[in-house]
Amino acid sequence: MNVSTWEWAATLIGLLALLTFDLMIIGRRPHEPSMKEATGWVVFYVALAIAFGGWIFYNHGSQYGQEFFAGWVTEYSLSVDNLFVFVIIMSRFAVPRIYQQKVLLIGIVLALIMRGAFIAAGAALVSRFVWVFYIFGVFLIYTAYTLTKHGESDESDFKENALIRWSRRVLPISKEYNEAKMTVVQNGKRFFTPMLIVMIAIGTTDLIFALDSIPAIFGLTKEPFLVFTANVFALMGLRQLYFLLGGLLDRLVYLSLGLAAVLGFIGVKLIMEALAGNNVPFINGGEPITAVPHISIGVSLGVIIGILAIATVASLIKSSREEKNNHEEKAPTPVG
């Protein structure tokens, strides 16, 4: 894929413009967005991603267009899973609703920076060493296994990591928030607010999720431009999606299983690609295994969309049945 300098420049300028616009809105008027506002922004970012994918189709061909959409859908679904943890963090640290937008936006900026670094490193490794696919593949299969085990998330699942515990022990931290500020002066002494701990929690969570998502998308495309833009479009609408879904996240009971199936599929695909281009001395004498079938990007896109659609529909059906059963149990028994 031949990506010109102006394409990279236009993409980065557009990203910075959107982030600046978001920061200006939140900085000027911190608020909890209404359902209408959140829906409008989510639709805007989804439409923007689809338009960008169409542009890739038109200018770079269907192969790269399908790779972008496969990567974007995968990253977007993983981002929805991220929201479960964000909800737990917001609840655990009692972040006021009107300041949650700013927390999420800063979290997105941190995620973009971290993923940008991982993408650069991953692209360098992938272009030079085929054996990296073995590591990525095994890692994704292991991640898929862990997703099948953790089940539904709740606040008790969140454990403060070493960095948070160290910050609490070493830094002077106040008990109350000071709007969305990181510090506050009390009795002539400067303290950090709980917002700092929240940012540390969000940042370290972003790092952990980046370790999952970057190998996954490299299993669908090896083009750094597509890897980066798919991540950008998946993350940019995450803040509004958080407020749009809200309590609906609890209804996606099979999302983790769906994501486990997707990551497992991509992990197997990566290992198959590694075998097909093998140069590891102790595997088949360092020769490629030509009998390994190739999974096209079109098939991959269909499998990913199919798995996520089944997981979503099954989740909503189960949640609907449980709500109906609970309603029937609570209904008063007629006297007669």
Image (cartoon, helix red, strand yellow):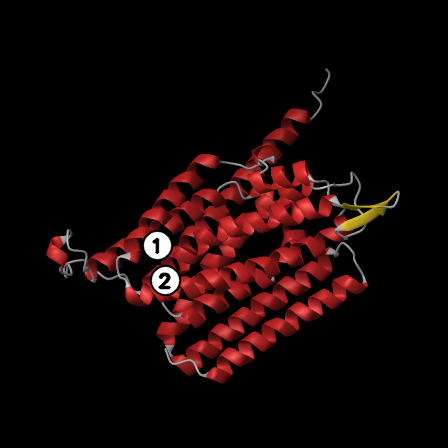
Res 113 → quadrant? bottom right
Q: Are marks 2 and 1 in contact (CB under 8 Å)?
A: yes
Which image quarter is the N terminus in?
A: bottom left
Q: Which of 56 and 99 is in front in this view?
A: 99
10 Å crowding of disc 2: few (<14), some (14-19), many (20+): many
Res 112 → quadrant? bottom right
Q: What residue type is labelled 2?
A: Leu
Q: Which amino acid does label 1 sit on?
A: Ile
Location of mark 1 (residue): 266
Q: How many marks?
A: 2
Res 286 → quadrant? bottom left
Q: What residue is drawn where x is 81% and y is 61%?
A: 29
Left of 172 or right of it: where is 58?
Answer: left
Q: What residue is drawn where x is 32% and y is 67%?
A: 127
Location of mark 2 (residue): 220
Left of 335 or right of it: where is 68?
Answer: left
